Amino acid sequence: MRLKKRWCIGLIVSMLGLLSGCEGISSVDSPLLEGKPFPEMELVTYDNEPFSLKQLKGKVVILKLWATWCAVCREEAPHFLAFSKKLDDSVVVVSVSVDQNVNSAKEYLLEHPNDFLQLFDKSMVQTKVVLKVSVIPQVYLIDQEGILRYFAVGAVVWDDEILKKVQRLLERG
């Protein structure tokens, strides 16, 4: 009975994800909770160098998961870029591609340049294992101490409400 109930919950969450413009199937076992430390992940830079999110401690971080095959991600990208231009250097915008082929993401970025810190998680290995993510896009707002303060699954409206969340974190800094 428990398995059947869990499957039903997973199906409902998946349906809501599809309705909200997400790509993939949702997981109901997310380890992320607002107010808790954001987990460490083993990602690589554009030049295939290892990168630790711990390097960003002391800064407010907006971390966005995306992929070139995600129609919602591509549709949302110009709005996210416009939003990012409202931020100053005290906020680090991190773009994490979960494309299986890193070259696809690199080609996309050449056609659609931005100033984000570009990181890669080939085939969602880290995001699936560490974050239990199977739906993108996702966005995380992480404070200066590495604590998750906000996250969203699916398309985000990059408006003043999100900007206020960022500004509140900067004021607490």
Image (cartoon, rainbow, N blue to C red):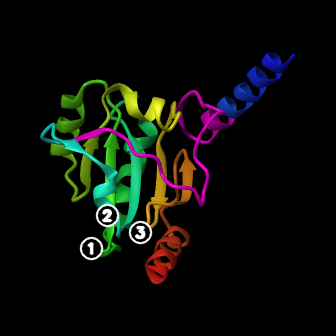
Q: Secondary structure at mark 2?
A: strand
At horizontal 58% and vertical 27% (from top left) the residue drawn is: 25
Residue 75: percent from the left, percent from the top? 41, 45
Q: Quadrant of the C terminus?
A: bottom left
Disc 1 marks which residue?
A: 89
Q: Vertical placement of 107 versus 55: above or below? A: above
Q: Quadrant of residue 170?
A: bottom left
Report the span colored magenta: 16-45
Which badge, 3 or 1, comes first in the chain's sequence? 1
Q: How many marks?
A: 3
At horizontal 51% and vertical 73% (from top left) the residue drawn is: 160
Identify the main secondary structure in magenta: loop
Badge 1: few (under 14), some or many (20 or more) residues near its Cα, within 10 Å? Answer: few
Is residue 169 magenta-colored? no
Tell me: 63 left or right of 4. Answer: left
Q: Amino acid at mark 3?
A: Gln
Disc 2 marks which residue?
A: 92
Q: Amino acid at mark 2?
A: Val
Query: Which of the pair 173/23 is nearer the observer?
Result: 173
Q: Secondary structure at mark 1?
A: loop
| Closer mark to the observer between disc 3 and disc 1 | 3
Per the model, the C-alpha gap separating discs 2 and 3 is 10 Å
Disc 3 marks which residue?
A: 144
Q: Secondary structure at mark 3?
A: loop
Q: Vertical placement of 152 versus 125: above or below? A: below
Q: Quadrant of the N terminus?
A: top right
Per the model, the C-alpha gap separating discs 1 and 2 is 7 Å
At horizontal 32% and vertical 30% (from top left) the residue drawn is: 99
